[in-house]
Each structure stands twice: as C-alpha cells, then as structure tokens.
Image (cartoon, rainbow, N blue to C red):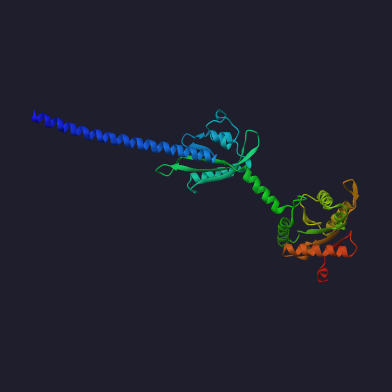
Amino acid sequence: ILISLADYAAVALENAGLYEQARDEIKLRKEVEDALRESEERYALAVKGANDGIWDWDLRSNQIHYSSRWKAMLGFQEDEVGGTIGEWFNRVHIEDAERLQLDIASHLKGVTTQFENEHRILHKDSAYRWVLTRGIAVRGQDGTATRMAGSMTDITDRKYAEAKLLHNAFYDPLTNLPNRALFLERLRFAVERAKRHADYLFAVLFLDLDRFKNVNDSMGHMAGDQLLVSIARRIEDGRRSTDMVARLGGDEFVVLLDEINGSDDAVNIANWLREALRQIFHLDGREVEMTASIGIVLSTNGYERSEDVLRDADIAMYSAKANGKDRYEIFDPSMRTR
C-alpha cells in the first residue's frame, strides 16, 4: 500500500507539472494571439488613417491583391478590379509607364533598397490622377524576390499645387505671358547657341508703350490692365511658334526672334507690331489708340550674357522714344556710350 501511495504521489506530481506546463503554454499562446490581434488592429488603423491603397504582389504566381481602398481611389467597386498586374500597369499614363517599369525592375534586382515612383493613373471617370507608389520586396535565401507589397497615395492636389507655384514663378499673372526670369533663361540658351554656331542668328525686340500712363490716369488702372492683356494677345498673334513673347513688368514687353536670316527679319516683325498696336482697342465702350517704341538688338554683336542683350535692347528702345516714339531703333555700341 505504501508503495502504491508513493507511486500515486509521484504520478500526481508529474501530472501537476504537466498541467502547469500546459497552462503556461496556453497562457503564452493567448498572449501571442492577443499581441498579434493588437498588431493587426494597429496596422489596419494605420492603413485606414493614412488613407492609402494597399497592394500585395505574389511574384511567383504573378497574382496581385488590391485593397478596397486601392480600388476606391480609382473609382471602382470591390468586384470591378481583378487580381492581375495589368489592372495597375494598363492604367498608367503612357509617358510614365517606362519609368515605373524601370523603378520596379531596379528594386527587384536589388539596385534600390525601396521602390518609389510617382505616376499618373487612369481613374474610372477617364481622368488621370497623380499617385505616389511605394513598396518593398520579400526575398528568399538566395536573394531572389518572391513577393512585393506596398501602398499607393493620391498626390493629385499636391502635383497641381506644385504646377501652380511653378507657373506663378515664371509667368506674369496678368497676361499669362512668360515673365523676366523665364525670358532670360530662354535667352541664355539662345546666347549659348550663338556662341557655338556661327550661322545661328537671333534678335530681341524691346517694346515700351507710348503714353500708357495717360490711359491709367484717365480711365483707371483696371482699364489699363485690360489694355495690357489685349496688347499681349496682339503681340502673341504675330509671333512664330519658335519665338517667345514675355512681359517684363508695367507696359514693357519683349520678343525673342529665334533663327532669323538677318536684320531685315527683325525689322519686318517690328513694323508688323507697330501696325498691330495702332489698331483701335475697345475698352468699356471707349476707343483707345496705342503706339509703341521698339528697340532691336541682334546677336551679331557677340554677347556673352543674356542680361547684356536685354540691357542693349532697352537702350535701343529709349533711343526710339527720344527720337519721336512710335518707331524702332537698332542697337549699336555708340548708343551705350551716349
């Protein structure tokens, strides 16, 4: 009996140890499950808060999962988008498709540590949206990518804001013509080209309206602004597709004549502009006549800087004003001395 009791006690102790072990394992498993559930909830909340679309691409089967948000960003319902890579790539703007493919290929080859690309993608409403796509590959022991997952963020508003800022930086807000900064940049290329190619000629016409101040004083600045817009359109009507018209500010305009044959081309354009500006302008039921003094500078003077070209065109324009207005003058170095 004593031996049996001893054996029973030993078995009981052993069972108690197993029970404790099992209870600890159950507790640990529950803690892991709770941690996993909490992690999944945190991840789901983060994704929802970020408002991004998620994609998960199985490279072995070439199947890809798109989240409901990914589909909704493009205007589609859950069942309207399949699980192929074509659902994404076939909607990418043709100008952005090659760059997207190259960026993905670079990451899959291990050239980049993370995939990132901005591109336009077709919405269900037939308009393009700008998106930022990021992702990272999962690799096997041999380094081969087996899976790639990431997110898609709509950046259309940001892209439009950037474009507007860029436009405002280089275009006149009143006439929507290029401003001084953009004109000088384009002129710089012309100067550099003239240095390299002896047969390349260009000219700059500097226009200043005669007696424009009278319009502002008699009719108000709003009428003056309307007149400037009308003048800008008339000057644009006479330019070639390779030329540039810009507003420097106030009532000053400039025209870059690209690839001319000689001074006669510049003179002919100057005379056309004078005639165009003489045509009656109608402002709030009133007729307004306008003329302009024009300075012409030719690239044959051998310029090194675009600012020097503009300076000499300005000097020639003031010479035209001094000699009676409503005329043009071609710059020569003696004007600079005077």
Q: Quadrant of residue 29?
A: top left
User: Is 325 placed above or below 93 here?
Assistant: below
Q: Is residue 336 left or right of residue 22?
A: right
Q: Is residue 272 left or right of residue 102?
A: right
Q: Is residue 309 left or right of residue 89?
A: right
| Total tally of numbered discs in the picture | 0
Where residue 102 appears, x then y in whole percent? Answer: 55, 45
Where residue 17 appears, x then y in whole percent? Answer: 22, 35
Q: In terms of depth relative to the viewer, which is nearer, 107 or 302?
A: 107
Where residue 60 appears, x then y in whole percent? Answer: 46, 36
Q: In terms of depth relative to the viewer, which is nearer, 111 or 230?
A: 230
Instruction: Locate the C terminus and report the quarter of the image it occupies.
Output: bottom right
Instruction: Locate the N terminus and report the quarter of the image it occupies.
Output: top left
Q: Quadrant of residue 31?
A: top left
Identify which residue is drawn at 18% across, 34% down: 13
Q: What residue occupies the far bottom of the structure in this picture?
A: 337
Identify which residue is drawn at 83% across, 68% down: 335
Where residue 79 appears, x then y in whole percent? Answer: 55, 28
User: Is 94 placed above or below 288 here?
Assistant: above
Identify which residue is drawn at 81% across, 71% down: 337
Can you see residue 148? yes
Can you see residue 86? no
